[in-house]
Image (spheres, rainbow, N blue to C red):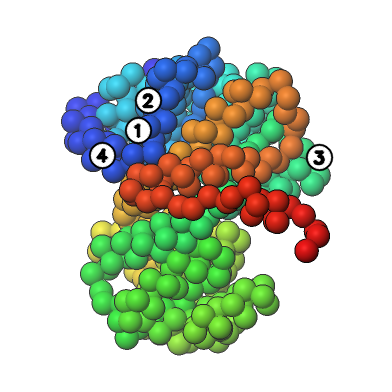
Amino acid sequence: MSEIRDITLAPSGERKISWVERNMPLLRGIREDFEREKPFAGLKIALSVHMEAKTAYLCRCLQAGGAEMHVTGCNPLSTQDDVAAAVAAGGIDVHAWHGATPEEYESHLVHVLEYEPNIVIDDGGDLVNLLHTKLTHLIPGVIGGCEETTTGVIRLNAMERDGSLRFPMITVNNARCKYLFDNRYGTGQSVWDGINRTTNLIVAGKNVVVAGYGWCGRGICMRAKGFGARVIVCEVDPVKALEAMMDGFSVMPMEQAAAIGDLFVTSTGCRDVITSAHFPLMKDGAVLCNAGHFNVEVDVAWLDANACERFEQRQNIIGYTLDSGRHLFVLAEGRLVNLASGDGHPAEIMDMSFAIQSLCARYLADHRDDLTARVIPVPETIDDEVARRKLAACGLSIDSLTADQRQYLSSWAL
């Protein structure tokens, strides 16, 4: 039985889902395929992804394929209660509400797993972690799963290295049609949507410090530059730091950037990126936010424990007064700013990412007897299919290799 805030919010959520459906042609086509083929007939899917409208439509796509769906969010602040209500009203089992406590959040994760899923769709690795720690008795029924984001893939790789992973997991995040578009263009736009909506401040002319120059960091920097900011990149990878420099950005350690920045965005997937060593160096009025999956990149716990004063400055902005009298402002409690302060990635971007999720879930169902407990890259055929579907949806076509060209590219002879 679903656990949501208020079922009467369903009409509002349904309007949101209808809007993204209109703008997700790939998933619409896949849903039609699934309705005919029923690849998930007799299977249960547990899903933990940000519970907003695009995710809701993914759930309906999988349900159309015959899956029994049990779903929750992957972040306490990204669940939209009206969307959760609409999903529940449509007959899908939902356990999620906005602002869940840590205990409620874990309870929701546990509930969707207690239905004994065959396929797991995860965003950040919380479902997989519970299955490998507290709910190991459910593992024999799991065919495999899909992981949506960088942080979850980092966890999976660590599990595979130490021999802990007990069922196959497809790294959806590492598909070209995911990271090249979702991580770069999706994050680049949605992070600034969240920041601008929440702060109502201008970006032009400010010193914006971005920690991490992976695909997400690249997108954030690109859009900050477009807004007219002076962009500073902090990195630990020397190659990425060089790339940031050659892309026209300043590069320096966080200790140096802390005194210069007006607005800070972390996007590393690591912990303790901005800490007590940096807070006292910052300008009065500096704004801090996080675009990494977990709220461990900015040490908000230290601010909560050590600031002279903590106050709500504006909705989703908490102010802290330091001993020096300076004020720092943290957006969305240090959680994912693009979802906790916004609506997440644009529908057209998530259309590609969730198309990969859907087709990878089908791949698991089709190959259930052939896969071993390991980290599996997205098959190239799925990446190519999604790209071709997207091009077709945009009214575009491309060239094809001739037989002679294929021969030339496959031969070592001149």
Q: Earlier in the sequence, mark 2 or mark 4?
A: 4
Dot 2: element: helix
How far apart are the two marked residues, 3 and 1, measured between alpha carbons? Answer: 38 Å
Q: Earlier in the sequence, mark 3 or mark 4?
A: 4
Q: Which residue is mark 1?
A: 28
Q: Which residue is mark 3?
A: 163
How far apart are the two marked residues, 1 and 4, measured between alpha carbons? Answer: 8 Å
Q: Which residue is mark 2?
A: 32
Where residue 2 sits, quadrant-wise, is top left
Dot 3: element: loop
Give the image location of residue 127, x and y in percent. 57, 35
Give the image location of residue 274, x and y in percent. 54, 71
Between residue 120 and residue 115, name the one nearer to us. 120
Dot 1: element: helix
Identify the residue shown where x is 65% and y is 36%: 169
Q: In the drawing, does residue 87 fall left or right of residue 181? A: left
Q: Quadrant of the image for the N terminus?
A: top left
Q: Tell me the amino acid under the disc marked 2.
A: Glu
Q: Tell me the amino acid under the disc marked 4.
A: Arg
Dot 4: element: helix
**From what the image shows, is residue 211 above or below residue 384?**
below
Q: In the drawing, does residue 156 fall left or right of residue 252? A: right
Q: Earlier in the sequence, mark 1 or mark 4?
A: 4
Q: Which residue is mark 4?
A: 22
Q: Quadrant of the image for the C terminus?
A: bottom right
Q: Are marks 2 and 1 in contact (CB under 8 Å)?
A: yes
How far apart are the two marked residues, 3 and 4, measured between alpha carbons? Answer: 43 Å
Q: Earlier in the sequence, mark 3 or mark 2?
A: 2
